[in-house]
């Protein structure tokens, strides 16, 4: 009941205080283990995504630097968020994330690891690709824009325009023996490729002109059955 109440309140606030445009909610599976990956532009990204995913088993990795915020800490704990130390290899957080996926839950991850300081995609870390490979689960890409200036606009009593585009679920190619690091990087590029395809050109940043390592998927082309990453 607490989760449902928080969900309803956050969703209502976004509808009242912003001009929110959402595409692709039909692509969110109703059940089953899954990793949701999204770009990260502002502090509103996580609560926004939580308000859009109507599943009781969704949680996310949350940087432990936010523990110091008196309001944020109990909220994350109430929603069973997984605190992670992004400054080092946090094996405890990764273990809890794996347990959540193995129990059939949905896990939200920002592959870039932190908010973009440029307003566009930055080079991503390999954590999301690692979890997807270990758990053997699909990936749901999400592109967000407008949140980078949303808080500042709210303080000026303006309603920010926020956009969310949800792509199709896909599976990454398996990691081959002897090429773990190269495979993780290839799959990380594929994840970011899928996210970038959902964003306007100005937000594509580091991935603006890059092909996936497979060579079969051009960034920003709509996903189709010719992709090496198979649709679920």
Image (cartoon, rainbow, N blue to C red):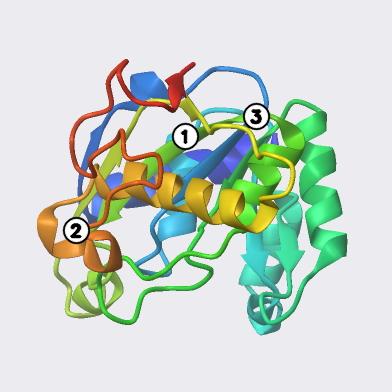
The location of residue 33, given as percent across then percent down, is 67, 27
Of residue 151 and residue 229, the one placed in the foreground of this image is: 229
Quadrant where the N terminus lies?
A: top right
> Does 167 appear above or below 67?
above
Q: What element carries label 3?
A: loop
Foreground residue, 168 or 227?
Answer: 227
Instruction: Tell me the residue at 14%/52% (across/down).
Output: 200
Rendered image: mark on residue 153 = none
Q: Where is residue 198 in the image (x, y as percent from the top left)?
A: 24, 42
Image coordinates for residue 147, horizontal then vertical, percent: 28, 63
- In the rendered image, is residue 232 in sight? yes
Image mark for residue 140: 1
Where on the picture, by quarter, is residue 148? bottom left
- Residue topped by disc 2: 209
Residue identified by numbered label 3: 137
- Point 85% across, 40% down: residue: 99
């Amino acid at each position: 009941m607490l989760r449902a109440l928080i969900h309803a309140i956050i969703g209502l606030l976004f509808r009242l205080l912003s001009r929110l445009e959402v595409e692709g909610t039909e692509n969110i599976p109703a059940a089953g283990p899954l990793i949701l990956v999204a770009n990260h532009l502002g502090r509103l990204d996580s609560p926004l995504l939580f308000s859009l995913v109507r599943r009781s088993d969704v949680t996310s990795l949350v940087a432990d630097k936010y523990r110091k915020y008196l309001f944020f800490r109990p909220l994350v704990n109430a929603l069973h968020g997984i605190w992670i130390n992004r400054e080092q290899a946090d094996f405890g957080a990764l273990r809890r994330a794996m347990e959540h996926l193995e129990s059939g839950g949905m896990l939200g991850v920002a592959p870039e690891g932190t908010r973009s300081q440029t307003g566009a995609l930055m080079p991503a870390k390999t954590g999301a690709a690692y979890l997807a490979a270990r758990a053997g689960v699909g990936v749901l890409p999400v592109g967000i824009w407008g949140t980078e200036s949303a808080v500042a606009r709210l303080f000026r009593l303006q309603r920010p325009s926020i956009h969310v585009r949800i792509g199709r679920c896909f599976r990454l190619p398996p990691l081959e023996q002897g090429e773990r690091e190269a495979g993780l990087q290839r799959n990380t590029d594929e994840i970011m490729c899928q996210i970038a395809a959902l964003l306007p050109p100005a937000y594509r940043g580091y991935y603006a002109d890059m092909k996936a390592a497979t060579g079969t998927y051009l960034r920003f082309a709509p996903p189709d059955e010719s992709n090496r990453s198979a649709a679920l």
